[in-house]
Image: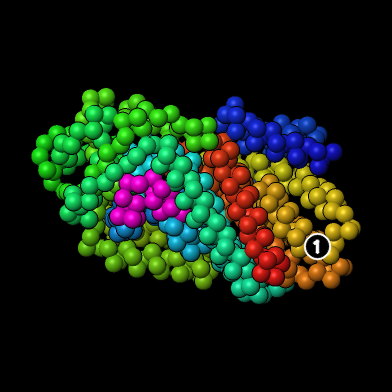
Amino acid sequence: MLTILGFAMIATFLVLIMTKKMSPIAALVLIPALFCVAVGQGAKLGDYVIDGVGNLAPTAAMLMFAIVYFGVMIDVGLFDPIVRAILRFCKADPMRIVVGTAVLAAIVSLDGDGSTTFMITVSAMYPLYKRLKMSLVVMTGVAATANGVMNTLPWGGPTARAATALKLDASEIFVPMIPALAVGLLAVFLLAYVLGLRERKRLGVLTLDEALVREPERETVTVGGSGGRSGGAAAADGTSGGTGAGTSGGSGGGAAGGRTGGAGTGGGVRLRKNPAALSAPASPEFPSSGTTDADRTEDTGEEEEFKGLDPNRPTLRPKLYWFNAGLTVALLTAMIMELMPIPVLFLLGAALALTVNFPHMPDQRARIAAHADNVLNVSGMVFAAAVFTGVLTGTGMVEHMADWVVGAVPDAMGPHMAIVTGLLSLPLTYFMSNDGFYFGVVPVLAEAGAAHGVSPLEIARASLAGQALHMSSPLVPAVYVLVGMAKVEFGDHTRFTVKWAVLTSLVVLGAGILFGTI
């Protein structure tokens, strides 16, 4: 009965958020509460929730201070060179923008932290997607899938868990899987290329005037209106943001100024759209980017200017650039070496970054306030997820679901238990935490495989195949950072991403089998 109710609870949650009948926070709280009562354990609901909150509190603290830390780093200009490099590569071409998203997410994922990856990726790419009216779920889907493949790094979590659970060396698990994981990453880049081509086709033909690129450090992307006028673009008198990512260090700004005039003050890249593309509707697979009427250029044929990161924003601290870079490298190094718990590292890092970059109290309060919306949304989502995981674990649903899945594997599949493990890693790492899968299910699968001569190393390697899908699981706190900062409905993200993530996971598994590591 608990098995059936467990699957029913997860299915109910997914259906409600994907059909937008309930918000993720409400569904994460109310659905498990109802099912807890349904299994006759309503009196213990409080204990289960407190246990869940206790388990996720360090994660919530880490996310809160990580958002503040990286928000400050974005404000002071630490990532401006990366953004400019990505913008130069993208050149306002939707295909290049999507590929750039995948590349950036993969590079930043080297730190092993999904939240960090999503904050930096969204901060860099969100403005381009927004102004070119590209589908934001393409950005979140590509970023999550790329990060899922890179999440298999030994310091990323899953590999270390598999090694611990099966008492193996992490390098023996990871190193032979590198070719398969490389193929998986190439599959993500290919996916980004295909999705980018589809976005380019949906939006229309884009052309660039390279001659206008005079000052790369002050690149400007100008989106032509339906009339396609070529008037100059003066400097915008507002910032580019107020996005959830805190990209511009401001909370309002816009691209209001400079619609008429001469050659402009900063040079830049000029983009003109096919007039038909300006009114092209989003396809069912590419939901609307969430652009409101207030964000659209008035239908006057005039041009709209946009700057990804305002080079003149008052929060920039160019004299402290190397201090901030050194602090970030030191923080990530300490995190990888596990010198302190990650929440403590980000707490100390955020305090130090605020104190050095903004020594005056009003400035510090302003920076905290600028990122408070993200902090509240993400931490609230994590604590709501604590109710879901607390009930799922406390009632015994997870254990019964895992036992049922393992028991459903036919004895004839014993010699192929590594492949079975790889296939099971897709749904199981999506519907339960990595801890539950690696410490609760993988040892059972390894024991079953050992009886048929299957090495625990093969089981451990195969268990990594599902990570591309795992990163979009509703039980992964980092995914709420991604959808929150990108202003994407979690249901839209899930509906778009799952199929591509499943395909990527199967590519990794197939490559592992082909290379003989699984």
Examine the structure image and report whether residue 99 is included in the region drawn in magenta.
Answer: yes
Residue 7 drawn at (x, y percent): 75, 40
Q: Which SS class for mark 1?
A: helix
Q: Which residue is depicted at the point 54% across and 52% down?
A: 145
Which colour assignment does the render follow? rainbow
Secondary structure mostly taken by the magenta-highlighted segment of the chain? helix
Q: Is residue 291 left or right of residue 188?
A: left
Question: How many residues crowd around disc 1 within 10 Å: few (fewer than 14), some, or many (20 or more)?
Answer: some
Classify residue 518 by image quadrant: bottom right
97 sits to left or right of 219: right
List x then y, in percent, for residue 310: 24, 47
Q: Is residue 394 left or right of residue 362?
A: right
- Judged left or right of residue 98, residue 242 is left
Question: Can you identify the residue that label 1 sits on?
Answer: 416
Q: Which residues are magenta?
A: 86-102
Task: Name the residue at the left extreme.
Answer: 262
- Which residue occupies 55% across, 65% down? 182
Q: Is residue 12 visible?
A: yes
